[in-house]
Amino acid sequence: MEEREIRLQKLKELKEKGYNPFEYRFDRTHTSIEIKKSFNELEGKEVKVSGRVISERFHGKASFITIRDFTGNLQIYVSINNLGEENYEFFKKFIDTGDFVGVTGTVFKTHTGEITVDAKKLSLLTKSLSPLPEKYHGIKDVEVRYRKRYLDLIANPDVINIFVKRSLIIKTIRDYLNSLGFIEVETPMLQPIPGGATAKPFITFHNALNQNLYLRIAPELYLKRLIVGGFEKVYEINRNFRNEGISTIHNPEFTMLELYLAYADYKEIMVLTENLLSSVVFSINNSYVIKNGEDEINFEPPFKRISFKEIFEEKTKENFDRFRDIGFALDFLKKENIELTRKPTFKNVIDEIFKEKVEKDFLNPTIVYDFPIEMSPLAKKKRDDEKWVERFEIFIKGIEIANAFSELNDPLDQKERFLSEVKEKEKGDEESHYFDSDYIEALEYGMPPTGGLGIGIDRFTMILTDKDSIREVILFPQLRSKEED
């Protein structure tokens, strides 16, 4: 008989005996970690603990089980002397690995030194109908791990630590920004015009309004409307959605920190970003240096800084201005075996070359500043050269982690750039910006000089948890649909 069928039969018997196999609550007094940390105070005292049974070892009239709660594992000693024959036989027959149990007993230490609870009473709280995966030896198949994250968390408890650390990273970011007087806000996820990034949006339809809406690709234009309205320090830890491919650093749904600081430019934002990232790393690791694979990454500020033009020419061995000739640029792609899957525009070619020839070589946090104006329709022009804009990105171990501007606050200039983006969209570039007339109108009321910053929370978490795929740090990553067996 299949294991699940056996468990279903046990469930039926339990119900026939009048036993509730799905209890309502249990009055727990201690977690497993609390018992281990406070053993000296708790030894010999009665406690109530609960958790999932992850292993059983039967030895005639006495047995051991191990239960797991969120804080860790705890050994339980179960004997016929304490439970009585009827209850002990009930335990042996009906309690399986995967079940949740509640235990009342006293704390002691075995002769091997393991802290244990001597069960005086054992209650079945939830009957597990499916056996734990692979007899609890863990799940290695990444498809199963991502599709059935609950099994991954059960079978691979270290995975829980990744998401505990992710939560701590986000909390530390919040605490840092709040300490500087930033205000956390919320902006729409459903937008009539998607903007704030170069990306293809998801489209939906609102029946009552009888119009298309878009899942946001970025909160940028709404956050800057708040700066127009009088906020001076705002941030949002936000969910964004981009209808793009899936890779080790891309998921269609992802988390960003985005902030705006009035009366600041990108140089001030550089310092803020260095201090934010390094403070988070030090707070979590008690060191600026973290281990990542075989590498050590040093977050101690200030970070290395280099201009886009300088590093681009260093890596390509070509004068940057030559790439404005699209023929030359495409020939370069062909010569270097760089595939371009987007429309062959100057900005797309430059972006692809930068990804393939430049950013992959960065290990320690590096600030690349001053980008071509064609790549940055929302950033202010450089004060001394209008072919470039005041923008920087931060790269860590070949991954873009942060993107920031001196924000464009000239409504006429912004309108011209939006119109230029629209022309590119009409030519087939689906990732070009939409024209947002309401945002232009907002700028016409006046936005103070402002610096803005976006940080990829998922990618930053990848670095800090030593993972090489974004799917490892997103609880439920997007996957191709699959027929269930």
Image (spheres, grey):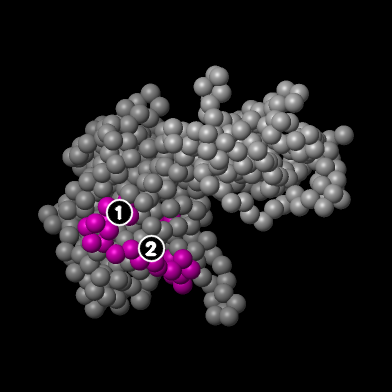
Residue annotated with mark 1: 175
In-image side of 280 versus 333 (left or right):
left
Tell which circle, 2 or 1, labels the residue nearer the N-terminal end. 1
Residue drawn where x is 45% and y is 44% of the image: 164
Q: Which quarter of the rendered picture does the C terminus lie within?
A: top right
Residue drawn where x is 79% and y is 50% of the image: 19
192 inside magenta stretch = yes
Query: As shown in the figure, which amino acid type bears the numbered disc 2?
Result: Pro
Residue numbers of the magenta segment:
173-199
Badge 2 element: loop
333 inside magenta stretch = no
- Residue that extends furthest to the top in the rendered view of this protein: 112
Residue drawn where x is 86% and y is 50% of the image: 16
Is residue 218 in sight in this rendering?
yes
Q: In this view, does 236 lie above or below 48?
A: below
Q: What is the spatial separation of the Cα atoms under label 2 and label 1, in whole angstroms? A: 21 Å
Residue annotated with mark 2: 219
Q: Which quarter of the rendered picture does the N terminus lie within?
A: top right
- Confirm or deny contact between disc 2 and disc 1 (CB under 8 A): no
Is residue 315 in sight in this rendering?
no
- Residue that extends furthest to the left in the rendered view of this protein: 384
Residue 449 image-quadrant placement: bottom left
In-image side of 445 versus 481 (left or right):
left
* Residue 40 horizontal/vertical position (percent): 44, 32
* Residue 209 horizontal/vertical position (percent): 54, 80
